[in-house]
Image (cartoon, grey):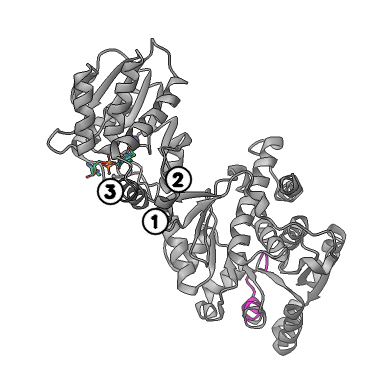
Amino acid sequence: MRNLVTGDQMKEVDRYTIETIGIPSLVLMERAALAVVSEIEALVNKKSNIWVLCGNGNNGGDGIAVARLLHLKGYKIWAILAGTRESGSREWLAQLDIAEKIGVQLVNFPEFPPGECNLFVDALFGVGLNREVLGTYKEIMEKVITYGPEITVAVDIPSGIHSDSGQIMGTALRADVTVTFGFEKLGTMLYPGKGYSGRVVVADIGFPAQSLSAIRPSFFTFESGDTKEIPLRPAYSNKGSFGKVLVVAGGRNMSGAAYLSALAAYRTGAGLVKIFTIEENRTILQSGLPEAIIATYDPEEAEADTASFKELLKKQCEWASVIVLGPGLGREPYVKNLVEEVLTNAYVPIILDADGLGAIADHPDLTGYFTENIIVTPHLGEMARLTGSSVEAIKKNLIAAAREYADRFGITCVLKDAVTIGALKDQRTYVNSSGNSAMAKAGSGDVLTGIIAGLLALGLEESDGAALGVWLHGRAGDAVREKYGSYSLLASQLTEEIYTILQEQTR
Ligand SMILES: NC(=O)C1=CN([C@@H]2O[C@H](COP(=O)(O)OP(=O)(O)OC[C@H]3O[C@@H](n4cnc5c(N)ncnc54)[C@H](O)[C@@H]3O)[C@@H](O)[C@H]2O)[C@@H](O)CC1
Ligand SMILES: [K+]
């Protein structure tokens, strides 16, 4: 598990470290600059022309320190100063004073250094960026973009990217490498910022654990090694030890959704999986996944005799220890009753997806049945329908959108996008770092519901199950892309790779 921070949280970590712990600000800055220099040295030689663009806050202070360290090592270096001395931060002025004394080559914008630039260091804005970039700063950035440096190394975060949302604040500088300090900022984890950051190196510059605790960190991601969080299947056990997953899914011409979800639950470790679906799906599902128990209903009877249908649903819910509700259910009128009955009768975790969410969007009163063991897994379109917001508005701040929905009902909300967000009911927010665009295919979401269900069946509670499920799903996607490339992934192949990731658990 790796902690992530907002810009304000990072500033608070800095402040606490300096004022309460007592590590001087310039010591942190020196370590930050050393970390950047070490990345730069792997990319240049003594003939390279290196330009460092420095704002006049502490990000720019880091930049001047980088220029000084490279100058002392004999590199061909120019620092370009943006902004005036009068508004420079204390640390920036200290760095400038040192740089001037030892003869670092400096130019003041609008002047630019002579010749060409082989490696560009972006130290214009860091986590202090808090408004749209306009005027002179915009001009500087545009000029850098037209220069087109061969390689760009960003200090802490690419300038112009908002550290909380990853949004471009008017203009931004694209980096090949971003060297960030202490903890990765949300802005380099989320698009479009993620696309501007290149390879992100998290440099340890000596923040003590107390400084992190002081902000009560709530954002995190998983990384390799975190498979260990998945519960072991003990040797002394039987199929009943690992939970009974009920997959309520699959309407007309949609047996595949039920199949993928059920298969993924089994592959993730569930002991028993039952698919509750329409009668016409029975044969195909039985031959496709003979390991699953199949229970069926007739949609016309479900429409005509609601009392019997409700009774049937009640029994299914009593059997289950985890329920997947929604994949491929379709939008016939009885689906509303079905969703309502499951929500009222089940006292176990429910993963609510696809047409299950559609029913909620069409009948918002159903949210009255939401309890803390609900996990909703909308993609952006479904989230827009659920909330009445536009996809564009949700995209501007995915974390806020997911968090707001989760908190409104006290549930867990997994908002699926290129970077999936898990606003967990325990108030932590998971930001996914696995997966790839090859997974943007039909059926991928059905597999995710099955994986989360499988993890809950193994005994994880909703928050951990949702976060680990998203991560495992992405890891499986990465494994499929390794073998089949970016175009040819099929959702069923995700289920085939789950085992390769789970094997790490016992390694
Ligand atoms: N001692 C410390 O506090 C440390 C700070 N560090 C560096 O300091 C950075 C944060 O420094 P600062 O808080 O000084 O802020 P920045 O250097 O990121 O920004 C400088 C100032 O620009 C102004 N600004 C914001 N948006 C603007 C816009 N659109 N147009 C024009 N001006 C704008 C703000 O007033 C801000 O204070 C980090 O990203 C990191 O690089 C590191 O050196 C580690 C230690
Ligand atoms: K920067």
Residue 307 higher or lower than 334, as above or below: below
Q: In which quarter of the view is residue 161 placed?
A: top left
Q: Disc 1 or disc 2, which is closer to the eye?
A: 1
Q: Residue at x 34, y 37 (%)?
A: 28
Q: Which residue is label 1 attached to?
A: 214
Disc 1 packing (10 Å; few <14; some 14–19; many ≥20): few
Q: Which residue is label 3 attached to?
A: 130
Residue 137 higher or lower than 1, as above or below: above
Disc 3 packing (10 Å; few <14; some 14–19; many ≥20): some
Disc marking residue 390: none
Q: In which quarter of the view is residue 304 placed?
A: bottom right
Residue 350 higher or lower than 234, as above or below: below
Say if disc 3 is inside 8 Å of ligand 1.
yes
Position of residue 187 measured from the top left corner of the image (x, y, whole percent): 41, 46
Q: Helix or strand or loop: what does disc 2 sit on? A: loop
Q: Are marks 1 and 2 in contact (CB under 8 Å)?
A: no
Disc 2 packing (10 Å; few <14; some 14–19; many ≥20): many
How far apart marks 3 and 1 lie (CA) works out to 23 Å
Q: Tell me the magenta residue range.
A: 327-340
Q: In which quarter of the view is residue 213 placed?
A: bottom left
Amino acid type at image mark 2 = Tyr
How far apart marks 2 and 3 lie (CA) works out to 18 Å
Position of residue 147 measured from the top left corner of the image (x, y, whole percent): 32, 22
Residue 380 in sight: yes
Q: Residue at x 55, y 77 (%)?
A: 370
Q: Helix or strand or loop: what does disc 3 sit on? A: loop
